[in-house]
Every structure is written in structure tokens, then in C-alpha cells.
Amino acid sequence: MDLNTIAEIVRPTERREIPAWRAGDAFLAGGTWLFSEPQNRLTRLIDLSTLGRPPLRATDAGLEIAATCTITQLENMSMPALWPVKPLIEQCCNAFLASFKIKNVATVGGNIVMSLPAGPMISLCVALGGELIIWTPDGGTRRALVIGFITGNNRNTLGPGEIVDTIHLPAAALTRRTAFRQISLTNFGRSGALIIGTLDAAGAFALTVTASTPKPYQFRFDALPGADELTARIDGEVAGKWFGDIHGLPAWRRDMTLHFAREIVAELGGGAR
Amino acid sequence: MTFRVNGNAFDEQPAPGQCLRTFLRQLGHFGVKKGCDAGDCGACTVYVDGEPVHSCLVPAFRAEGHEVTTIEGLAKGNALHPMQQAFLDAQGYQCGFCTAGMIMTAAALNQEQKADLGRALKGNLCRCTGYRAIEDAIAGRCDAAKPEAGRGVGHNVPAPAGPDVVTGHARFTLDVAIDGLHHIKLVRSPHAHARIKGFDKSAALGVSDVVAVLTHEDAPKTLYSSARHETRETDPDDTRVLDEVVRFIGQRVAAVVATSEAAAEEGCGKLVVDYDVLPAVFDPEEAMRPGAPLLHDKGPEARIAEARRNIVAELHGATGDVEQGFAEADVVHEGAYFVPRVQHAHLETLCAIGWIDDNGRLNVRSSTQVPFLTRLELAHVFGLPRDKVRVFCERVGGGFGAKQEMLTEDIAALAALKTGRPVKLEFTREEQFTGATTRHPMKVRVKVGAKRDGTLTAIEMHVVSNTGAYGNHGLPVLGHACSESISVYRCANKKVDGYAAYTNTVPAGAFRGYGLPQTGFAVESAMDEIARMIGMDAIEFRRRNVVRKGDPMIGLEQSPDDVIYGSYGLDQCLDMAQAAMLRGDGDEPPPGWAVGEGYALTMIDTVPPGGHYSDTAIRLDTDGGYGLTIGTAEFGNGTSTVHRQIAASVLNARPTSINVRQSDTDHGGHDTGAYGSTGTVIAGRATQFAAQALHDTLLDFAAKHAGVESKLCKLADGAVECDGKSMPLAELVKAAQAQGVELRAHGTTNGTPRSVAFNVQGFRVAVNTVSGEVKILKSVQAADAGTVINPMQCRAQIEGGVAQALGAALFEEVVINDEGRVTNPSFRHYRIPAFADVPHTEVLFARTSDELGPFGAKSMSESPYNPVAAALANAIRDATGVRFYRLPLKPDRIHAGLKAAAN
């Protein structure tokens, strides 16, 4: 929709051209959320797309995803054979309520910064130990793990004028075996629970719980846990703070989470995926 | 910056925060539609460098240096794109408002995406079709027949507007460029109940380009109802164009008129309103209790049943003795059912353009189902002579009852009259949820008794309808809800009590089914339970208890004298639906899911009570074609096609030779409107009469002209044949003109007597008892539509009705919090069915012919919706053993219900 209060667009082509942040500014990535709701307090948009960051770079250290990389670019990337997480990336890229036309424009960074419980790029990056490289307004950078970055529904630690530049997925995480479960109240709808299990070569297991909780949770085990142990850990840590809105009641989200958690352990315990 | 659209360069510059959608429309590409303006519906889909995008989400400045393609640029010259042709061949549209975006998306799909349309089309919402016809189009199936003379009624004649719809040239309400057009934005109440103490307009008027700030001080004092009915006294006079008391969050407080939408919006933000906040009530039963805050302090002249108790309408009816009936029963089921608020979600939001013409007349171009009734009420409210007001519509983007209200025309009229400028008011999608109307939420307590042999002994129903802050449609919806839902059953003892109460919530209004889906959910669930209690098959139980031709139809009262069995096909519908289910086809259930089947039926009067009028004028034009002028509006109901077919059949002409002009008060005559499923049975009947009269006139004139007896003359394709000699119609017109004879005729109908139509829905479902997910394995609807004038269209109408009803059954609900605020006013949070949500429905027609409708036809627009929710609930009950008393049946609710039952 038209954002009628916007008086100015800034299109920097490199970092030093980004103007000093002021009240009423918003950074424009894909624009798919920004332009989907009234933004009456905004007066200036700073376009990040003109920075021209390379969307994806695979290195020995892992995968560098530019915040401005589109969902479609991530979904379609060709991956080194040593990284068996490609199906997980596709599963997460398919867990959007949004259509493929929006995925052509929406960005990975935008989904993370939006920090909705159902943001599937959050699920993916938390499951794969993702770390954010954040540009600070003073010209410096800081790093933050995605899991700590998200603090609640639509809340994160990003300060005024800070920009998420890159998401780093460490190489070790990209070699893990994964299992994925997701449910929505409607077909291809917004996730009510999105649960990912990963198993590394040493047998260590991590369960990432998203969409059913206001912020992501991760439960780590040295080996695959039993069902009771898993349930107790999840229930103990989430401690009743299950997310609830029109896209799913809290009790349903909890039960789906626990059900999927058990299925994931069974799947990863069963050898080949 | 230069922008390239469809190969043309434009030097106009967008505003910094402007989206591509409005910029493209500003440049004249009206095929780019607004359904949601938020990336959820896909109606605005265009290509940027060949990639499909939702143009409402694309900042316009980003299109610079890229090639933009809109629906207008998809065809190569006069050759349609194959996907446009495919949508014509399969008639993959109804109202056509979503069609441009649908075609743009479908044309961009690769083979892999076409194999998974549920996923590929999840960003394209259609409210009319139920998607089957769209699927047919994409699959390249051809359902439309070629035009041939006399092949009208009974044939799959395509919609006349098709070529314009698929190319983006069909003009919907706002698809016009008007010089000097001003824009209206509404300030809406943040309070559920408040008295306005005053305004400070200075800052708002200080915004440059703001022309006027209109408030209750500027509005007429005349009270009226936004509901439009043939008899205006049907609804209470409880509404003002702008009121000094606001009664729900979202009620309009002021209208800001400016030369741009941005300035109007800024003016709204700067208007200071001083409110005296009043206590509010949100629950209709609480509202009726002594001491509850009162919404309308009005006298008897307002026609509110009991303003002192917030009761807008109260109805009671009884026959026999229900206590005696329950005493005789072997089994009794009693349940309290609840059906929540849902929204129509027509893709074209409410909108209107108003202006004063050179003759000083008020003109309103509106998205309406009722132009004639709106004209009358505008004249009444603004104290204007009737001939000083014109209301008309071209193509309307969906209605479903929502446009049987006057919700934009009054503001447009006020602004045009006060400023003298042409003005436009367009609701946002959010305003559709917070400031328009919804279906009436109803609490329905039903008690049913039966003997073990399957005889019904008593039916008792207590209905509380929440009409919201205004009483538009409150009484007639309640009346309808309390009638056919129980009058379809033969039972000696019945009692029904109905109340419609005001609350401080967004008003309810007319909605497809008009009360019957709500009470139908309760009654048909109860009938299912009773059949289970006595161990009888649900269809067999209904066979024994439904009315048969000749039985009195007793609901709220002894059936009004003018409802008759013009035909009766309920027995066939029950048999057909059951036979289709017994075939056992349909999808396989996923392993481990519980499977069940369920049915429900509904009856509906074919016409609303109290008179429903329609005039048709028809003439032979100089080119030998026929000019047909009708009052009824086209909003996807397909009646324009039907009228063509009727005239073509009577006149033995090609449907394409019938040129329809419609829905404009300037055309003369009267038309009550396209509501109550009357576009075919009432307006169509008028067209049949008119065409028959013209037929006779033509033959008489031709006979005289040829000097033979008129019985030796007959109409053929484009000619009249008199005793073996053929004379082209174009020559006949010339001959008539030479003699000063006009070859024209007129037909009229008054809507009485009325008949009844029937629908039976069957579902087989699978339920995942862990997650609560429901998968529909088989869906069948048998319909008694009388003569089916256009099988392709009528099937699509039924499919669309089933789809819309499935939305309400499965997930749609307008949620209002404890402050009275709608919390999900967008398609992202108010989900309507997408392609993947809608199963195929097998549509079966009973073989009947009605003695009242044109060519034996009956109404079939609202009624397919009505039995769906109950049939689904009954199937889920069958699968899980748990009865659900509240819609919608979302997985989280089913999960909760199953857990509660297990404990």
C-alpha cells in the first residue's frame, strides 16, 4: 500500500553512504512487510537493496547469507555436496504463508528482523547455529546469535540505526542430519509449530522449537533423549509460555511441539533419513 | 526517472512512499486491482522484468529501469495470451475482480508449479468460484459453448463480459479516470461507545490540499438504515450519515476531503475529536439485561422493538404444544450452538464516486447490489427530489449481501453536495473488517424430540442474534433464521423465540444465506444427533421428517400465503447426495486418520418476502441486435448471462446478439435489487415477459409488413421468416422506423407468489485425532434449482457457495476483543479459502421445473452455502464421536474438543 508519510528515499550504494539514523527512518529490504501495513510514523526509507551485497557465499567457514538475499535465492542455491542441509533449507523456505511471488522479493534478513514466532528463516538459522553480523551506527559491527537476538513476539535486540548485514551459518552445522516438522491451522498457512531436529556426527542432538513459542528455544542433548526426558525438558523450560493467537491456541501448539519432538527423535534415531 | 509499462515510457514520477500498484493505476492501468493492498490476495499481480510480484508491496521507485507488464500488456495485439483464452474457455471467473491477478500468476507458472496449484496459487484469492473453474482454465479444459441462435436456456453460454474481464478492460467501480477527482478518508472512532463533545478542525483544515472536514454538524439529521429493502420500514431508522454518538470502534466520525488521498489521510490524523466515553456492552444477552448501557435512545418512530432493552427485533412463533411433544419423545437432544461473525470478503472493497453534474443532479457510481433502492434513500436522507439523484454501477467485484447496504454512497453524496467536487471513497481492506458489516453472530439453543420409530415430536429453538451497533437487517435476518430452518421439517409441535440485540460492535448485515446458515448449523447438527440416538441413518431420518409437496411449511408462523411449492425436489436431492456418497469414491484418507460422513439439508424461499420488483425493457436495435435494459446488477452472480440466455431462447437469437445495459437508475423503471437470490427468478422473469412481448410485436409488424398472417411468421437467427421469405432484422427496423413504429417491449415482475428451493450437502472427512486437522475426502451437493438455465454457471455458483461456506466452517472468524476491537482485520489474519483449502465438490441437480420462475428456474445463489457447516460438523462427529457446537472447526479447537472428550 502507499506509505503516504514517506517524504524521502535514500539509496546508498555502500555503507558509508548510509545516513545517520533519525526518528522516522526505516531500512527497506524486500519491503514485503513494510508496504503491507500502514506506517504512519515513518518519514524516510533507506533502501538496502542498492548496497549490492552478494546474496550467498559458501566458504570453508560456512555459508554467508546477505540479509538482503531473497528467500527464492536461498531456496534455489546450489550447495556443496558436503552439506546435507539443503532439504532443510527448502523445507524452511516452503514454510512461509507468503506466496512465491513474495518470496521473489522478501529477504532472509527481513524475516529475522521481523522476529515473528512463525518466521521460518529464524527457525532455519537457529537450528543451524546462525550468527548475525550487525552494522552499528558508529561504523562498527557486532555479532549476535540468532537465538539470543530474538527476545519475543516481534521483539529483538536490534538497536536504532543498527542493520543486520549478514547471517553466518557455521560449516559444522551444515554437515548435520536434520529432521523437520511443521503444522498450520490451514493449508500452507502460517506456522503454528515449526520444529527442527539436528544430529551431528558425534551423536549430539539439538531440538529447535519455533512458531509455538514467542521466541525460539533450543534444547541440546549429548545423545538422542528418551521421550519423557525430552518432554520434561521442553515443558520445564518453556514453562507454560506457549504462544497463542488466531493462528493457534497455546495448548494445541504445545501438544504439536511435543508430538513433533518425539517424531523427530524417532526419525533421527532410525538411521538414514 | 522513466518508467516502462507494457512497452510504453512514462515520465510521471511516483511519490516517495508510493507502491507500484497505485502508480500503475495512476498511469491508467486499471486492470491492476486492489483486493487487500497487503500482499495477501494477488489481485494486483504484475510482472517486473517478467517476474510476477504483488505490485502493492513493490515500492514504485524500484520499478525504474525495469520493464513492467500488466494484464493490459499480456495480449499481443488482438491475440489473447493463451492463459487469457483458457480463462475464457473454462469461464474461470465470476465477478472477475481477482481475474487479472490470477491470469498474470497462472501465465507465469512453470510445469512443476502447475502440478502443485495449491502451493503455486496460495497468494491469489478468489471469493466467488471455489477455484474449480480456475483449475479447469489452467488445465486447458473448455466448458463454454459456442454461441448459436436459440441456444439460450439450458446451455453453457459464456458470460458476456468475459473478453473484457480477461484483458483487464472490464470497468469496476473505480476503474475510471475523472478530472479533478477528490478523495475522502474517514476518521473512525477509537471508542466502543462515546458522545462527541466537539472537534478542533484547524490543524486538519491547515493541511494543504484538504478541502473540507465534514462531521455530524454538516450531516443531515434524518435517520435511516444502511440496509436497503424494497420497503424502507423493514429496518429501523437508527443511523445518521455522521452521528454525534459513536457506538462501535470503527464507526465513522468525520470525512476529510482533499485533492489527494495522502492529504486526506494526513487531515484525518490531525483532526482533534473530544470524546465523552460511555459504558459499552459487547454480549447480546448482557445487552438485554436491565441496567445494560443503552445504545439507541430513540422513540417508536425509529421502529426499534424495545430500545430500552437494546432489542432491535423480537419474534415468537409456536404450533402445537412442545412440552407435550417432548413428553412423547423417546429421545431428546438439546444443544447450545454458536456461529460467530464472518465477513463477506468480496475482493472489491466498498467504494463509490459522487459528483454533481451540469444539471445539478447528484450522481453516484457505486459498488452496489441495490442502485435503485440506494437512489431512493439518498433522496430521502438528503431531502432531494428523486429525479435529482442518479445511482448506478458497472461491474461489481463481489457482494454476497455486503452491498445491500448504503455504506459509502451517503458519504460520497454528502461530500459531493458540500464541496461541489467529484469525490471518491474507497474502503481499505481493514475498513472492511472494522467499519462495514459482517454476518450476524447467533447463539442458537435447539431442543429436538423424536420417537424411536423416527417420528419428530417437538422442535424448540431459541435464537439470540447480535446485530452490532446498528439494526440494519436485524429483523429480517432473524425472521429468516427462524423460518425455513425448521419449516422444512414436519412436526406437530414447534416453538421458536428469536431476539436480535444491539451491542457496541461492528454492525452485522445482510450475508449470503441471510440467517439460515446460522440456525441451519444448529438444527441440522441436532437432527444428526437425534438420528444417532435412535440409531437411524441420517438421510433416512430426514426422508421421514421433511415436508413433502403440499405439506404446510410452519416455522416462525404458518407459512405466508405466497410461498408455494412451485416445484419440489428435496426427495431427489436426498437420494442423489446419498447415492453419490455410497459410491465410495473420493480421496483416500491418510493412514491413521479417523473417517466419518455427514449430511445436512436446507430449504430456502426463492424470493424475499414483501415484494420484489423488476422491470425489463427490450428493443430491436438498428443493427438487428437486441438492446436489453435491466435493473439488476452483475457482481459475479452470472445473471447478465442468464438474461441473455432467456432473451435468446424467446427470440430464437444468438446470445451474443443480446446487448445488455444494466443497473442504472437513469435507464428508468424500478429494480428492487440483486439480493435474496432474485437476479434470475425475478429479474429474469421480467426479461422473459419483455422478450415474449417483443417477440409478438416483431411478428405482428413483420406479418403486416409482408402482408401475411402473423402465425406464418417466425423469428430465426438475425431475421424474421414470413411464409418462407426471410427478412433481416436490420431491415425490419428500418421499415419500422420509416413508419414511425418502435419495436420495443417491456416486462415486469413483483416477486409474488414465491417458491422454495433445496440443497443437500454430504461430506466424507478424515480427521487427524492428534493434530485436529481435517481433510475432506469427498464433497457432494445436490441442488433443486428447478430448470438449470446455465449448467456451467450454476455448477460454479454452487461450488463457490460451498467454498465460501467451508471458509466459515473451517477457519473464518472476525475476532472482537473485550474492548470491542476487531483484532484480525486483514486477510493475513482472517483467512479466506485459498486454492488448497477447497476440495472438488460433485454437483448434482434435481430434475424439477418450477411453475413460477423463468423457464422453470429457481434461485441458486445463496442457498448452496447454507448446509455446508452442519454437514461438515456432522461428518467430524461421525469420525471422532465428538459433537462440536461452535464454528469454526479449526484444528486447534478440534484438538481441544477431542482432549476434553477423552478426559
Image: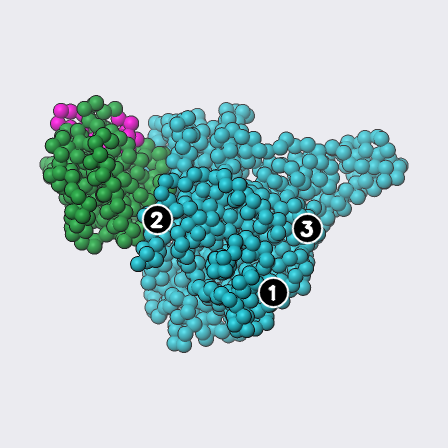
Chain colours: A green, B cyan
Residue at horizontal 26 percent and vertical 26 percent from the top: A77
Frontmost residue, B413 versus B35: B35
Q: Earlier in the sequence, mark 1 or mark 2?
A: 1
Indicate the position of residue B422 as horizontal and vertical percent values: 49, 49
Say which amino acid is labelled 2: Thr
Residue tagged 3: B850
- Can you identify the residue that label 1 sits on? B554
Distance of label 1 from label 2 (alpha carbons)? 40 Å
The one of B839 and B808 positioned closer to us in this rendering: B839
Badge 3 and badge 1 in a common chain? yes
Q: State whether residue A17 is above or below residue A189.
A: above
The residues colored magenta run: A58-77
Q: CA distance from mark 2 to mark 3?
A: 45 Å
**x and y percent of residue B844 in the render?**
58, 43
Between circles 3 and 1, the one closer to the viewer is: 1
**Any magenta on residue A65?**
yes
The residue to which callout 2 is attached is: B769
Q: Residue at x 58, y 65 (%)?
A: B491
- Residue at image position (76%, 46%) is B693
